[in-house]
Image (cartoon, rainbow, N blue to C red):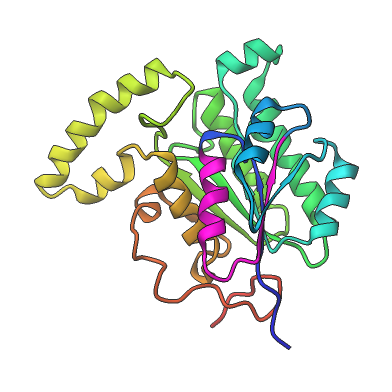
């Protein structure tokens, strides 16, 4: 019997990268359905619903363990893309005192617990950040590392994708410090790449949402990336995972030897 077509469930689907992941997954050959999660009451969710169709469905399950577990069990996704995040400005607006711990780490743990109840379990594709490490000083990167650790210890098949600075003219939410960083760093990295430091350029140069999403989807649907970290230079290499895509023997991604 032929295995069922993959089903991608995208959390953070109303965000900058998450929306692009929804679109990239829907364009991917062989993917049967894409489910885009939006928080109940989210105005961005309404905009998402107005702009999707075809193989894309919008899910508004509350961010609570029992409803999430039931929603995942009902659709049984083969791939769970976790692309959520927050900013200091948004956290102040929503009254969050420790935003990265609550969102980047806490919500990731919640989604992993809900996914662990699904049989067979989905493959988790987690959007992390370059610089995430146990020695990271800032709260953002420190909690990204802890979220990575939660993914690794979940018992679920996973792919962790460490993206560089994300942004571009298409990013509606103003982030002046990140824009300044891209404006200064990207030209310098381009010069370094021209004189031979191509890996450094490819790892550190910024990405827009479409580039990051294409990398996440390429990596997430390939057997060579199961249970490993994909660095940013791999995310932007268009041909690196195109030769042989994920061909499941079952709904769970089993590495082939």
Q: Is residue 8 left or right of residue 224?
A: right
Q: Nearer the viewer, residue 51 or 192?
A: 51
24 within the magenta span: yes
Q: Nearer the viewer, residue 249 or 169?
A: 169
Quadrant, the N terminus: bottom right
Q: Which residues are magenta?
A: 17-38
Residue 231 spot, x, y in % from top left: 42, 51
* Position of 254 relative to 33 (above/below): below
Residue 207 spot, x, y in % from top left: 37, 40
Q: Nearer the viewer, residue 22 or 99?
A: 22
- Classify residue 131 by image quadrant: top left
Residue drawn at point x = 40 percent, y = 70 percent: 242
Q: Nearer the viewer, residue 226 or 243?
A: 243
Quadrant, the C terminus: bottom right
Residue drawn at point x = 67 percent, y = 29 percent: 103
Query: Total marks drawn?
Result: 0
Residue drawn at point x = 32 percent, y = 23 percent: 181
135 within the magenta span: no
Q: Is residue 131 left or right of residue 86?
A: left
Q: Residue furthest bottom?
A: 1
- Classify residue 59 by image quadrant: top right
Q: Residue furthest left?
A: 195
* Position of 3 relative to 82 (above/below): below
Residue 188 spot, x, y in % from top left: 18, 32
* Position of 90 relative to 225 (above/below): above
- Classify residue 94 by image quadrant: top right
Residue drawn at point x = 65 percent, y = 21 percent: 99
Residue 30 spot, x, y in % from top left: 57, 71
């Amino acid at each position: 019997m032929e295995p069922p077509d993959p089903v991608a469930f995208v959390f953070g689907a109303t965000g900058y990268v998450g929306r692009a992941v929804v679109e990239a997954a829907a364009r991917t050959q062989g993917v049967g359905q894409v489910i885009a999660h939006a928080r109940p009451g989210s105005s961005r969710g309404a905009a998402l619903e107005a702009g999707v169709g075809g193989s894309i469905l919008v899910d508004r399950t509350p961010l609570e363990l029992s409803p999430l577990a039931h929603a995942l069990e009902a659709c049984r996704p083969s791939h769970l893309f976790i692309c959520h995040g927050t900013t200091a400005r948004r956290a102040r607006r929503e009254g969050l005192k420790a935003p990265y711990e609550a969102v980047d780490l806490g919500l990731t743990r919640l989604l992993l617990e809900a996914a662990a109840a699904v049989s067979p379990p989905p493959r988790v594709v987690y959007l992390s950040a370059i610089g995430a490490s146990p020695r990271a000083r800032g709260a953002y990167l420190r909690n990204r590392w802890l979220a990575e650790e939660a993914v690794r210890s979940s018992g679920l098949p996973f792919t962790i994708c460490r993206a560089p600075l994300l942004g571009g003219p298409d990013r509606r939410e103003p982030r002046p410090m990140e824009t300044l960083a891209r404006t200064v760093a990207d030209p310098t990295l381009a010069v370094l790449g021209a004189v031979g430091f191509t890996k450094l350029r490819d790892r550190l140069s910024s990405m827009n949402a479409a580039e990051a999403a294409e990398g996440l989807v390429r990596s997430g649907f390939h057997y060579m990336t199961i249970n490993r970290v994909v660095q940013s230079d791999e995310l932007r290499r268009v041909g690196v995972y195109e030769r042989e895509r994920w061909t499941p023997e079952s709904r769970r991604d089993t590495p082939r030897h």
